[in-house]
Amino acid sequence: MSGSTAKKVLVDRYDRTQVKGFVQTQTLVQGGEIELLSTEGAVLRVPVGQVKTVSFVRDLNGPSVWTERREFLARPKTPGLWIELRFRDGSRLEGVAPNDLLLMEGQGVTLTPPDPAGNTQRVFAPRESLAGAAVLGVVGATRRRAQARPEPARQIRLFGEE
């Protein structure tokens, strides 16, 4: 693992244990496993079926997304898809995902959690850990409107225009 692309993560499992370590973002899920380098220096492979979420964090000793705010208090301001993920154990998590449907076809969903000042910067939820997902809104969508043009008969003429 090269140090330049290794990110700090907290891997929350369904057995309520947590693994701290570093992952490569390009090869997060390979062969049905998440490979990470633990803080003790051992390479761990966690089966995706046991993983609830992978929280990309600022500090390894800080809280994960499950101990921070999991819902938006108001409509989010960040552009993207405002989504709610429902997990197999009945828990829910809201976040903003990029408004790009090609990103939804991968091994899971990556989103930005509701608390911008919290320890968790991004959350990856493997597809196997989800029971469902719902789009709550589209934030920052620009609507194209036809420009209103003046009617030719009502426009005043200048300089002898016809």
Image (cartoon, rainbow, N blue to C red):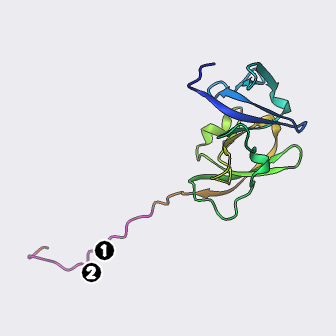
Give 72 or 141, whichever is nearer the viewer. 72
Q: Is residue 41 positioned above or below 141 on the image?
A: above
Residue at the location (64% across, 31% down)? 7
Going by the numbered disc 1, the residue's amino acid type is Pro
Location of residue 105 (image quadrant): top right
Provide the residue designation for mark 1.
Answer: 150
Residue 75 position, x and y percent, is 64, 63
Question: Which stretch appears magenta?
Answer: 145-160
Give 11 or 47, whichever is nearer the viewer. 11
Provide the residue designation for mark 2.
Answer: 154
Give the spatial CA distance, label 2 vs label 1.
7 Å
Location of residue 2 (image quadrant): top right
Tell me which secondary structure the magenta stretch mostly adopts. loop
Quadrant of image for the C terminus: bottom left
Q: Is residue 108 positioned above or below 75 on the image?
A: above
Q: How packed is label 2: few (under 14 Cα within 10 Å), some, or many (20 or more)?
A: few
**Residue 89 placement, left or right of 134:** right
Residue 16 position, x and y percent, is 88, 39
Q: How packed is label 1: few (under 14 Cα within 10 Å), some, or many (20 or more)?
A: few
Q: Which mark is residue 30?
A: none
